[in-house]
Amino acid sequence: MMSETEFAGDGAAGIETRFSSGVYKKREITIVRGAGARVWDSEGKEYVDCNAGHGVAVVGHCNEAVVRAVSEQAARLMTCSETFCNDVRAELLSHLASVMPGDLDRFFLCNSGTEAVEAALKFARLATGRTGFIATMRGFHGRSMGSLSATWEPKYRRPFEPLVPGFSHVPFGSTAALEEAVGPDTAAVILEPVQGEGGVHAAEPEYLRRVSEICGENGALFVVDEVQTGFGRTGRMFAIEHSGAVPDIMCMAKGLGGGIPVGAVALGSRVGPIPTSVHGSTFGGNPVACAAALATLGFIRDADLPGRAAKLGEYFVARLKSIRSPLIRDVRGIGLMVGVELKQRSGPAIQALMDRGVLALAAGATVVRFLPPLVVDAGDLDFVANALEEVLATVYA
Ligand SMILES: *Cc1c(COP(=O)(O)O)cnc(C)c1O
């Protein structure tokens, strides 16, 4: 037996340091409670949460509608595999179909972003009988072997090579490179309409429309990864809607479950029926997860979170652009998916923001990324911008 004194630190931090795998670089605070756009640590300190669990908390922490739906469903039926039908799952599927762009109206339910991407890759292979995939430089699609093969960042890929064969990467935004790369072996092109991990880079609408056409002309499918951009984050329900391009497959996760793990893949008419038993998930379509997602979608609609993200995002980006600091290289944003690119590494700024009561994320080495809950208000965003202004004026001095 291990005694308390052998832990590397106090409380949860010490225990996590001792007993977790080591794959996460942990920050020093222990978060114990959340409400709306705020979280609190074990010392009672309050934060405006622009990390939001990597953008998961779209409807806010402990959203009342989601809490109620989860509690009620947990007391009624907590598990039911997709071998059987389920009332709440059926309701979720039809609600999802009603919010999808284009002809996306059939779904595979899973539990995370990477699982959604894995399923999309398998379905694209099945539907086309081809094995080639084209992804984009700086793209991020997850960390299991298939999705990692689509992910660009060498530091994530290298330790695990050889990966799945058939993947190539082209510059994000270049139609010429894509035309060159797509061929008779291409099952699909996969990309994020706004690259998240890669540094908050939004694709030009014209580019996305051309990607869709190039796929169509070559018998390949267009897969959009909306795991981070979906459910109002960018000011539309889905980021692809800014372009009017219609994908054949869409991957979703993060915000969908209101904080409960849920992922989904949507299929359009160019993807035929998926044969029985070729894919599956034990937890996929779980009734508690479905109840959470249904309540989340209802809240997003009733509170017009996409409209709110569009308006507040514009306000926030304008405020950030007004910061006069020689350290800022660029401010980029679409809705409430916002990146501030520095001329220095972003790590010290993110740490100093935390000390001032703001949680943010990195995106690559030099970008500070803000993914606040879409229920955040203008006052919170002022607080965040003021904190960043202070941090840039002092921390790198
Ligand atoms: C987070 C993310 C993923 C992976 O999701 P997990 O739930 O962590 O597996 C995939 N694609 C994009 C665009 C993401 O932002």
Image: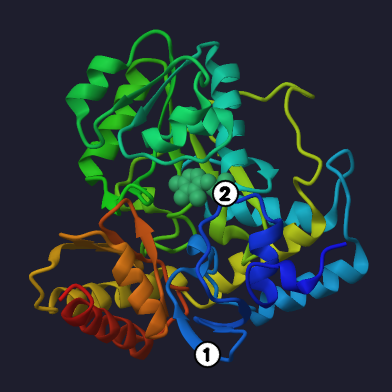
Mark 1 — residue?
Answer: 45
Look at the picture and state if 202 lies above or below 36. above
Location of mark 2 (residue): 23
- Image location of residue 182, percent across then percent down: 32, 16
- Res. 223 image quadrant: top left
Residue at point 85% right, 52% down?
86
Bin the neighbour count of mark 1 within 10 Å (Cα to Cα): few under 14, some 14-19, many 20 and up.
Answer: few
Indicate which disc, 1 or 2, sits on the residue closer to the N terminus.
2
Q: Are marks 1 and 2 in contact (CB under 8 Å)?
A: no
Residue at left offset 38%, top offset 43%: 192
| Residue 282 can be seen in this image | yes
Residue 74 spot, x, y in % from top left? 86, 68
Task: List x then y, in percent, for residue 361.
Answer: 40, 64
- Secondary element at tag 1: loop
Q: Is residue 394 above or below residue 252?
A: below
The answer to which of 240 and 38 lies nearer the viewer is 38
Q: Secondary structure at mark 2?
A: loop
User: Which quadrant, please, contains the N terminus?
Assistant: bottom right
281 or 352: nearer the viewer? 352
Give the amino acid type for the residue marked by disc 2 in the picture.
Val
- Tell me: 327 left or right of 298: left
Report the side of 286 relative to 145 (left or right): right
Compute the Cα span from label 1 to label 2: 26 Å
Toward the top, the furthest residue is: 184
